[in-house]
Image (cartoon, grey):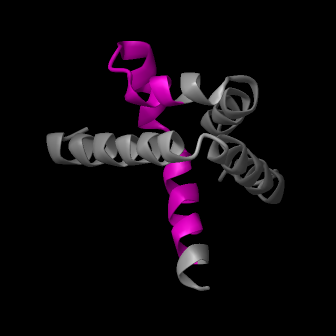
Amino acid sequence: MNTVKMNSLKRDVLEIAMELKNDPKKTRVFANKLRLRICKAAFSKEVSDHHWEWYAILTLWPPLEVIKLLEDSIKSATGLRRAVPLLALLSEEEEVTSSF
């Protein structure tokens, strides 16, 4: 992955972390949106193991641990962040908010 793309991803992931810091309850909102996306695309290739992994994280982990994971720089967290499906959910939320 090139440096520009990596920096952009890191910025996006940190944006999600900030969003969750401002309102930790959004962790459950993201989990519900991700569950809906998984259900809609259950038989297509749009849903990967990363979607399921993030769904488990969002539903089982406390919000502060999710934020810590998003901000953490250790290698195990880096692998998870590389495939974070929350970026699409964040942009969906902005579209919904801007339409009102």
Q: Give yes or no for residue 19 being in the magenta stretch.
A: no
Does residue 93 sit above or below 22 in this rendering? below
Given the current orientation, which residue lies at the most extreme bottom position? 100
x and y, in percent, of residue 73 in the image: 32, 20
Q: Residue at x 67, y 43 (%)?
A: 25
x and y, in percent, of residue 72 in the image: 38, 21
Q: Give yes or no for residue 80 being in the magenta stretch.
A: yes
Does residue 38 sit above or below 10 in this rendering? below
Q: Which residues are magenta?
A: 67-95
Q: Nearer the viewer, residue 42 or 82?
A: 82
x and y, in percent, of residue 36 in the image: 79, 55
Q: Residue at x 47, y 23 (%)?
A: 68
Q: Is residue 33 left or right of residue 69?
A: right
Given the current orientation, which residue lies at the most extreme front position? 22
Q: Nearer the viewer, residue 6 or 98?
A: 98
Q: Residue at x 63, y 34 (%)?
A: 54
Picture quadrant where residue 7 is located? top left
Give the tally of numbered discs. Answer: 0
Q: Nearer the viewer, residue 83 or 56?
A: 56
Q: Magenta residues: mostly which secondary structure?
A: helix
Instruction: Quarter of the image for the C terminus: give it.
Output: bottom right
Does residue 32 sit above or below 14 in this rendering? below
Does residue 53 sit above or below 9 in this rendering? above
Q: Residue at x 53, y 43 (%)?
A: 20
Picture quadrant where residue 9 is located? top left
x and y, in percent, of residue 29 in the image: 70, 50
Instruction: Quarter of the image for the N terminus: give it.
Output: top left
